[in-house]
Amino acid sequence: MAHEENKAFLRRVPLLSSLNEQQLETLAAGSARRNFPKGRTIVAEGEPSQSLYILLSGRAKVQRSDSEGKEVILAVLGSGDFFGEMSLIDEAPRSASVITLESCDFMSINKDAFRSMLMQSNEMCMAVMRGMVRRLREADKKIETLALLDVYGRVARVLLDFSELVNGERIVKNKLPRQEIAKMIGASREMVSRVMKGLEIDGYIVPLPEGRLMLREKISSYIS
Protein backbone atom coordinates (compact mmCIF):
# COMPACT_ATOMS: atom_id res chain seq x y z
CA MET A 1 0.00 0.00 0.00
CA ALA A 2 2.78 2.47 0.90
CA HIS A 3 4.52 1.78 -2.42
CA GLU A 4 1.33 2.53 -4.40
CA GLU A 5 0.70 5.67 -2.35
CA ASN A 6 4.25 6.85 -3.01
CA LYS A 7 3.79 6.28 -6.73
CA ALA A 8 0.51 8.22 -6.68
CA PHE A 9 2.19 11.19 -4.97
CA LEU A 10 5.17 11.10 -7.35
CA ARG A 11 2.84 11.10 -10.35
CA ARG A 12 1.48 14.51 -9.26
CA VAL A 13 4.92 16.16 -8.90
CA PRO A 14 5.70 18.50 -11.84
CA LEU A 15 9.41 17.59 -11.72
CA LEU A 16 8.52 13.96 -12.48
CA SER A 17 5.72 14.51 -14.99
CA SER A 18 7.79 13.16 -17.90
CA LEU A 19 8.42 9.74 -16.33
CA ASN A 20 6.63 6.67 -17.64
CA GLU A 21 4.92 4.07 -15.47
CA GLN A 22 7.98 1.81 -15.17
CA GLN A 23 10.22 4.72 -14.22
CA LEU A 24 7.72 5.86 -11.59
CA GLU A 25 7.61 2.29 -10.27
CA THR A 26 11.40 2.27 -9.88
CA LEU A 27 11.46 5.70 -8.28
CA ALA A 28 8.69 4.82 -5.83
CA ALA A 29 10.78 1.89 -4.59
CA GLY A 30 13.48 4.36 -3.56
CA SER A 31 11.08 6.92 -2.06
CA ALA A 32 9.42 7.57 1.27
CA ARG A 33 6.75 10.03 2.31
CA ARG A 34 7.58 11.95 5.48
CA ASN A 35 5.85 14.56 7.63
CA PHE A 36 7.69 17.12 9.76
CA PRO A 37 6.27 19.64 12.26
CA LYS A 38 6.92 23.38 12.22
CA GLY A 39 10.49 24.35 13.12
CA ARG A 40 12.12 21.05 12.14
CA THR A 41 15.47 21.10 10.31
CA ILE A 42 15.10 18.78 7.32
CA VAL A 43 18.66 19.11 6.05
CA ALA A 44 21.56 20.93 7.70
CA GLU A 45 24.22 23.06 6.03
CA GLY A 46 27.53 21.22 5.74
CA GLU A 47 26.08 17.70 6.02
CA PRO A 48 26.55 15.07 3.28
CA SER A 49 23.53 14.59 1.02
CA GLN A 50 21.73 11.28 0.67
CA SER A 51 18.30 12.29 -0.66
CA LEU A 52 16.36 14.64 -2.88
CA TYR A 53 13.33 16.15 -1.13
CA ILE A 54 10.12 17.25 -2.84
CA LEU A 55 7.75 19.43 -0.82
CA LEU A 56 4.18 18.17 -1.17
CA SER A 57 2.47 20.61 1.20
CA GLY A 58 3.42 23.38 3.60
CA ARG A 59 6.28 25.91 3.49
CA ALA A 60 9.96 25.72 4.40
CA LYS A 61 12.82 28.21 4.41
CA VAL A 62 16.29 27.79 2.92
CA GLN A 63 18.75 29.37 5.33
CA ARG A 64 22.48 29.90 5.79
CA SER A 65 24.37 31.08 8.88
CA ASP A 66 27.87 32.33 9.60
CA SER A 67 30.27 31.38 12.39
CA GLU A 68 28.70 33.99 14.68
CA GLY A 69 25.20 32.59 14.21
CA LYS A 70 23.93 35.37 11.96
CA GLU A 71 21.29 33.95 9.64
CA VAL A 72 20.10 34.86 6.16
CA ILE A 73 17.07 33.38 4.40
CA LEU A 74 17.84 32.56 0.77
CA ALA A 75 14.38 31.36 -0.28
CA VAL A 76 11.01 30.13 0.92
CA LEU A 77 9.81 26.87 -0.63
CA GLY A 78 6.22 25.86 -1.33
CA SER A 79 4.30 22.87 -2.69
CA GLY A 80 6.05 21.29 -5.68
CA ASP A 81 9.49 22.76 -4.91
CA PHE A 82 12.45 20.43 -4.48
CA PHE A 83 15.88 20.66 -2.89
CA GLY A 84 19.00 18.58 -2.36
CA GLU A 85 19.72 17.89 -6.03
CA MET A 86 22.94 19.94 -6.19
CA SER A 87 24.69 17.87 -3.51
CA LEU A 88 23.53 14.65 -5.15
CA ILE A 89 25.05 15.79 -8.45
CA ASP A 90 28.40 17.23 -7.31
CA GLU A 91 28.88 15.19 -4.08
CA ALA A 92 29.58 18.38 -2.11
CA PRO A 93 28.07 18.92 1.37
CA ARG A 94 24.70 20.64 1.72
CA SER A 95 25.12 24.35 0.92
CA ALA A 96 22.25 25.48 3.16
CA SER A 97 19.81 24.31 5.80
CA VAL A 98 16.10 23.78 5.12
CA ILE A 99 13.73 24.38 8.05
CA THR A 100 9.95 24.00 8.07
CA LEU A 101 7.84 27.13 8.60
CA GLU A 102 4.73 25.03 9.23
CA SER A 103 3.79 21.35 9.21
CA CYS A 104 5.10 19.92 5.92
CA ASP A 105 4.74 16.73 3.88
CA PHE A 106 7.74 15.62 1.82
CA MET A 107 8.72 12.86 -0.54
CA SER A 108 12.35 11.86 -0.09
CA ILE A 109 14.07 10.09 -2.99
CA ASN A 110 17.35 8.35 -2.25
CA LYS A 111 20.54 9.16 -4.15
CA ASP A 112 20.68 5.95 -6.21
CA ALA A 113 17.07 6.25 -7.39
CA PHE A 114 17.51 9.92 -8.28
CA ARG A 115 20.71 9.37 -10.25
CA SER A 116 19.20 6.41 -12.05
CA MET A 117 16.28 8.54 -13.21
CA LEU A 118 18.63 11.26 -14.46
CA MET A 119 20.43 8.66 -16.56
CA GLN A 120 17.18 7.29 -17.98
CA SER A 121 15.19 10.48 -18.62
CA ASN A 122 16.41 13.48 -20.60
CA GLU A 123 13.15 15.23 -19.74
CA MET A 124 13.82 14.88 -16.00
CA CYS A 125 17.37 16.21 -16.51
CA MET A 126 15.89 19.26 -18.22
CA ALA A 127 13.34 19.71 -15.41
CA VAL A 128 16.11 19.62 -12.80
CA MET A 129 18.18 22.11 -14.81
CA ARG A 130 15.18 24.43 -15.20
CA GLY A 131 14.74 24.37 -11.43
CA MET A 132 18.40 25.22 -10.88
CA VAL A 133 18.30 28.03 -13.46
CA ARG A 134 15.17 29.45 -11.79
CA ARG A 135 16.99 29.57 -8.46
CA LEU A 136 20.00 31.21 -10.09
CA ARG A 137 17.77 33.92 -11.55
CA GLU A 138 16.17 34.42 -8.14
CA ALA A 139 19.62 34.70 -6.58
CA ASP A 140 20.59 37.32 -9.19
CA LYS A 141 17.46 39.30 -8.36
CA LYS A 142 18.23 39.08 -4.63
CA ILE A 143 21.77 40.36 -5.19
CA GLU A 144 20.38 43.23 -7.28
CA THR A 145 17.85 44.05 -4.54
CA LEU A 146 20.48 44.14 -1.79
CA ALA A 147 22.89 46.19 -3.90
CA LEU A 148 20.56 48.77 -5.47
CA LEU A 149 17.51 49.25 -3.24
CA ASP A 150 17.22 50.99 0.12
CA VAL A 151 15.53 49.21 3.01
CA TYR A 152 12.06 50.41 1.94
CA GLY A 153 12.65 48.99 -1.53
CA ARG A 154 13.94 45.70 -0.13
CA VAL A 155 10.89 45.27 2.11
CA ALA A 156 8.59 46.19 -0.80
CA ARG A 157 10.29 43.60 -3.03
CA VAL A 158 9.78 40.86 -0.43
CA LEU A 159 6.11 41.76 0.01
CA LEU A 160 5.52 41.80 -3.74
CA ASP A 161 7.35 38.50 -4.22
CA PHE A 162 5.16 36.82 -1.61
CA SER A 163 1.88 38.33 -2.82
CA GLU A 164 -0.80 36.81 -5.05
CA LEU A 165 -3.58 38.35 -7.11
CA VAL A 166 -6.92 37.66 -5.41
CA ASN A 167 -10.02 39.19 -7.02
CA GLY A 168 -7.92 41.93 -8.54
CA GLU A 169 -6.11 42.77 -5.29
CA ARG A 170 -2.51 41.86 -4.48
CA ILE A 171 -2.60 39.90 -1.20
CA VAL A 172 0.13 38.43 0.99
CA LYS A 173 -1.76 35.36 2.19
CA ASN A 174 0.77 33.88 4.60
CA LYS A 175 1.88 35.85 7.63
CA LEU A 176 5.44 37.14 7.23
CA PRO A 177 7.08 37.66 10.65
CA ARG A 178 9.25 40.78 10.85
CA GLN A 179 12.26 38.68 11.87
CA GLU A 180 11.91 36.51 8.77
CA ILE A 181 11.76 39.56 6.49
CA ALA A 182 14.84 40.96 8.24
CA LYS A 183 16.79 37.78 7.50
CA MET A 184 15.80 38.00 3.83
CA ILE A 185 16.96 41.58 3.29
CA GLY A 186 19.95 41.96 5.62
CA ALA A 187 18.33 44.40 8.06
CA SER A 188 17.40 44.37 11.73
CA ARG A 189 13.96 43.36 12.96
CA GLU A 190 13.52 46.83 14.46
CA MET A 191 14.24 48.49 11.11
CA VAL A 192 11.77 46.22 9.33
CA SER A 193 9.11 47.02 11.93
CA ARG A 194 9.63 50.77 11.39
CA VAL A 195 9.44 50.37 7.62
CA MET A 196 6.29 48.27 7.81
CA LYS A 197 4.66 50.81 10.09
CA GLY A 198 5.62 53.60 7.70
CA LEU A 199 4.20 51.69 4.72
CA GLU A 200 0.95 51.18 6.64
CA ILE A 201 0.62 54.83 7.71
CA ASP A 202 1.29 56.03 4.17
CA GLY A 203 -1.29 53.66 2.71
CA TYR A 204 1.04 51.34 0.81
CA ILE A 205 -0.11 48.26 2.75
CA VAL A 206 -3.37 47.42 4.52
CA PRO A 207 -3.39 44.84 7.36
CA LEU A 208 -6.01 42.08 7.03
CA PRO A 209 -7.19 39.41 9.49
CA GLU A 210 -4.91 36.45 10.31
CA GLY A 211 -1.72 38.36 9.55
CA ARG A 212 -2.45 38.82 5.84
CA LEU A 213 -1.68 42.04 3.98
CA MET A 214 -3.19 43.87 1.03
CA LEU A 215 -0.68 45.77 -1.09
CA ARG A 216 -1.63 48.99 -2.85
CA GLU A 217 -0.42 49.35 -6.43
CA LYS A 218 1.80 52.33 -5.55
CA ILE A 219 4.11 50.10 -3.46
CA SER A 220 5.79 49.08 -6.73
CA SER A 221 7.23 52.63 -6.92
CA TYR A 222 9.81 51.57 -4.33
CA ILE A 223 11.40 49.04 -6.69
CA SER A 224 11.07 50.88 -10.01
Image (cartoon, helix red, strand yellow):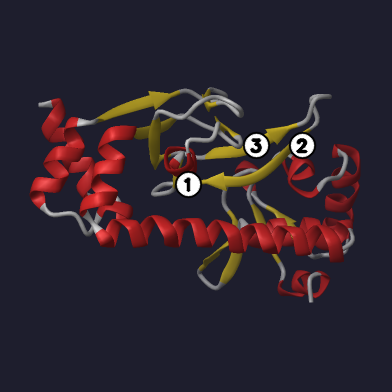
* Numbered badge on residue 179: 2
Q: CA distance from mark 1 to mark 2?
A: 19 Å
Whether residue 126 is situated above or below residue 196 in the rendered picture? below
Camera-side residue of 111 and 174: 111
Q: Is residue 37 left or right of residue 6?
A: right
How many residues crowd around disc 1 within 10 Å: few (fewer than 14), some, or many (20 or more)?
Answer: some
Whether residue 92 is situated above or below residue 214 in the rendered picture? above
Q: Please tell me whether mark 3 sits on a helix, a strand or a loop.
A: strand
| Marks 1 and 2 close (CB-CB < 8 Å) | no
Q: Is residue 151 left or right of residue 171?
A: right
Residue 66 sits in which quadrant? top right
Mark closest to the chain's N terminus, 1 or 2: 1
Q: CA distance from mark 1 to mark 3?
A: 15 Å
Instruction: Say which residue label 1 marks.
Output: 78
Q: Position of residue 4 (x, y in %)?
A: 11, 34
Q: Position of residue 128 (x, y in %)?
A: 39, 55
Q: Residue at x 74, y 45 (%)?
A: 181
Q: Is residue 171 something one can see in this rendering?
A: no
Camera-side residue of 170 and 5: 5
* Numbered badge on residue 63: 3
